[in-house]
Amino acid sequence: MQKLFVEGGTRLKGTVKIGGAKNSAVALLPATILADSEVIIEGLPDISDVVILSELLEEIGGTAKRDQGTVHIDPTKMTSMPLPNGKVKKLRASYYFMGAMLGRFKRAVIGLPGGCHIGPRPIDQHIKGFEALGAEVTNEQGAIYLRAEELTGARIYLDVVSVGATINIMLAAVRAKGKTVIENAAREPEIIDVATLLTSMGAKIKGAGTDVIRIEGVETLSGCTHTIIPDRIEAGTYTIMAAAQGDDVLIDNVIPQHLEPLLAKLREMGVDIEEGEEHLRVRRSDETTAVDIKTLVHPGFPTDLQQPFTTLLTKAEGTSIVTDTIYTARFKHIDELRRMNAEIKVEGSSAIVYGPSQLQGARVCASDLRAGAALIIAGLIADGITEITGIEHIERGYEQITDKLTNLGAKIWKEEMTEEEMAQIQN
Ligand code: EPZ
């Protein structure tokens, strides 16, 4: 196991290239189960979630050959092999194996998904969708069993706007008999990306990206080549880093429209941002003012940028209120920021940030992916050295983050943990 060190104070300068979207990748890979010939996905990010999902595709009998960002998946020999334990438990997105395997084999056994510890993450809406399509769903000793004689299109109204449920129902419905309508669907760009892949495979989907998605089931889906969209959360994280500590940073391979709520808030704070067609250019400002943010479903401010943004607010003049309406307890980073001298109070689903405070390097722990990003940003702006454990969470979602930041001039490096330190963490 390794830990990460960041020496604060260095200004960032140069270009950073954004990789493929993690939250698309984790759905696109399971979606390939639905095809009956080779699917090629290009531009996948170099992160551990992609490795684990590729291995899972092989566990059920497929082949997944990775060559840098391109994966060739041959789904022809896949079977409905039960996946109750092991790798599926490591990441939340393994729940997409439910929809995809149900869609192809009409049966699946999948362990209850793991993933980041950011509060309760129920999957009742996924199950409601599968049942509406005709599946019987049972929970037996921590594994979900899905069985259907036949899947038949249905009208499904989501009680909660859910990215995962919207994608999972699409996966199960594309090969169902007849028409499915998903109402109150989530509208995230990743949903459009998955619908684009499925459409290239031969699925009939209309309305992805709006809150009503219409699917006309087809009997078979075939292979294709698909290029993933850029990761808006990785791009947003580097944009926040540049706003905090950038002299002049060019963030390349971005769809700026995907980041509008973030860019609007940064401009409101006084950060200088130039938008190109596929890039952003960001320069920090010495004086930024406090702003309030409230996370909402897309196209609102994304919950996945709430934690990194909170760190930035510690530098701003005045009091900011950060409210997370999606994951109301996504505040595990706050205690760590406090250790670094931030003045922040959590009240219900809000964090109140009293700025500005000069952060000080400290030993901190990344409890989840975006908390980890928040702590790296804190390390970049702090006085002295920040030591971050729990970096396996960060590597689940940010490709080559130490290399990318080093290229921008940051002083950041990894070291092996001693046995004593590892024992302390495990206790
Ligand atoms: C996706 O999670 C992302 N993960 C999350 O990113 C992201 O935070 C989240 O969407 C919101 O944007 C992946 O795409 C793999 P939801 P997901 O279903 O799909 C409630 C990151 O850091 N809900 O849209 O699991 C749920 O509790 C990760 O990259 C139900 O009540 O999120 C939450 O409050 C973390 N019942 C809200 O809906 C359900 O059946 C939105 O969750 C499903 C969800």
Image (cartoon, grey):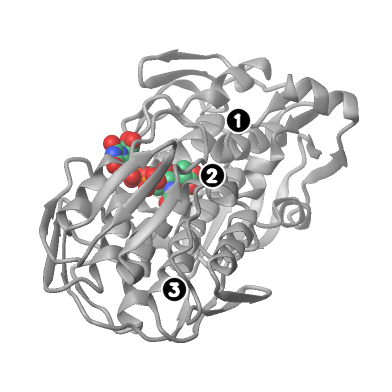
The type of residue carrying mark 1 is Ser
Q: Residues within 10 Å of mark 2 (few under 14, many from 20)?
A: some
Residue holding disc 2: 89
The type of residue carrying mark 3 is Thr
Q: Earlier in the sequence, mark 1 or mark 2?
A: 2
Residue holding disc 3: 32
| Nearest to the observer: residue 315 or residue 216 | 216
In the rendered image of this protein, does residue 254 appear above or below residue 130?
A: below
Label 3 vs label 2: CA separation? 20 Å
Residue at horizontal 59 percent and vertical 51 percent from the top: 87
Residue at horizontal 25 percent and vertical 63 percent from the top: 209
- Give the mark toward the camera: 1 or 2: 2
| Nearest to the observer: residue 292 or residue 363 | 363
| Nearest to the observer: residue 201 or residue 218 | 218
Horizontal and vertical percent for residue 197? Answer: 38, 76
Residue holding disc 1: 367
Q: Residues within 10 Å of mark 3 (few under 14, many from 20)?
A: many
Q: Quadrant of residue 140?
A: top left
Q: Secondary structure at mark 3?
A: helix
Label 3 vs label 1: CA separation? 31 Å
Q: Secondary structure at mark 1?
A: loop
Q: Are marks 3 and 1 in contact (CB under 8 Å)?
A: no
In the rendered image of this protein, does residue 396 appear above or below residue 218?
A: above
Label 1 vs label 2: CA separation? 17 Å
Q: Quadrant of residue 416?
A: top right
Q: Are marks 3 and 2 in contact (CB under 8 Å)?
A: no
